Amino acid sequence: MMRSVAEPELASAGGSAVPTDVVGMAHDLAPVLAERAPKFDEGDHFVADNYALLKEAGLVQAGVPLELGGGGAGIAELCEMLRIMARSCGSTALAFAMHTHQVAIPAWRWRYQNVAAVEPLLKRVATDKIILLSSGGSDWIGGSGKAEKVEGGYRITARKVFTSGAAAGDILMTGAIFRDEDGTEKVIHFGVPMRAPEVTVMDNWRTLGMRGTGSNDVVIDGLFIPDAGVSFSRVAGQWHPVFQIIATVAFPLIYSVYLGVAESARDIAMDIARKKPGGETALNLAGRMETALRGAQMAQRSMVEAAERNTPSAESVNEVMIGRTLVASHGLEVVELAMELAGGASFYREKGLERRFRDMQGARFHPLQSGPQARYAGAMALGMPVDAIF
């Protein structure tokens, strides 16, 4: 029977909030997510029904600190939650990872930097169970969209791509480029209310994999953002210290999803292979797959450990991004070997292996992609400034 932890309760004796068992809840939800996954994938449908389950289970507010009314889950627990979800439905896990990291980042800043300004947002997540969206991967260092300075604020015009979970979102955490009087291009960061009339969610997510994430474009046409709504600004195209926090906290969560996808591909392939006559070829493929999967698992563990040291820096970004590349490369090798080991059966949708193969391809596209990541690692190794690589 599914446990109920939809609300963080107060312990009668100690008066402190009870942490959400995010790992236990993920295990409880896994069979339902697995049963629904083919339908979402085959119809290009957003996993809206699964989001309702996640809200009911208390996972929306899981990363909010206990003191602010949330579930108090740390990075390692949230990573494990997403990894377990991804074994059943990669789309649900990946879309939810975008909300989860947008909660985890302000939670980290509240906990370790004493940033009081993030409290209202975190409390809204805990109380109202609002869903946060991210455009970070598509914007990243360069930014996108236009911010025009007007009296009292900015007028925003933009098209944000890869906005996972857009249909379910309440606030899009994003930015736009503002040209200062001296000609300098700056990126201002702000939250976009998704119910505003100036905001439209397109229906254009038709993709190879991760089809249920609903990562549609979001069009912003003349939305007014007051000066007080701008959280910070930075020079466009230049590395900013805030990215040390974003990269260190967010990417272990995102790539835990891809590890879960690879693990489930391995399990499906092994189940098929065990029912066929063995041989030298099968032994070789199975062994190579196991080795590649172990590499992905070790890389993901190193990412989590880097985040758990709670010291975001150029060094932690390097560790996390090396891990990101290794999880991606080993995970892609796992799904390729899984298809080969399973043989012709892997080509049938009903086995679920070809969906894992397609979903895993998404690991290629999140920042830092292989070229920038290699340059970043090279700059660190040679003692050169990392700012120059972007």
Image (cartoon, rainbow, N blue to C red):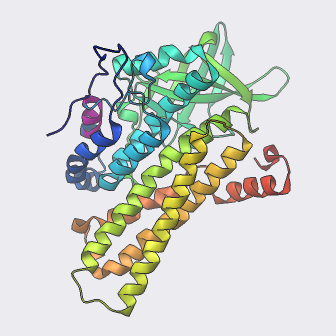
- Would you place residue 210 above or below residue 181 in this image? below
Residue at 30% x, 14% y is 13
Q: Name the side, left or right, on which 356 lies relative to 132.
A: left
**In this view, which residue lies farthest toward the front?**
13
Observer-nearest of 188 and 124: 124
Q: Is residue 47 among the parts visible in the rendering?
A: no
User: Which residue appears at 38% of the width and 23% of the height?
Assistant: 130
Which quadrant holds residue 159?
top right
**Residue 374 can be seen in this image:** yes
Residue 96 lies, in percent from the top left, at 39, 39
Q: Is residue 373 rendered to the left or right of residue 347?
A: right
Position of residue 69 in the picture relative to residue 244 (left or right): left
Magenta stretch? 50-56
Residue at image point 57% right, 47% down: 305
SS majority, magenta: helix
Which part of the image, by quadrant, shows the N terminus?
top left
Q: Is 52 within the magenta?
A: yes
Position above or below: 32 against 284: above
The residue positioned farthest toward the top in the image shown: 152
Measured from the top left, where is residue 3 in percent x and y?
A: 20, 35
- x, y percentage for residue 358? 40, 62
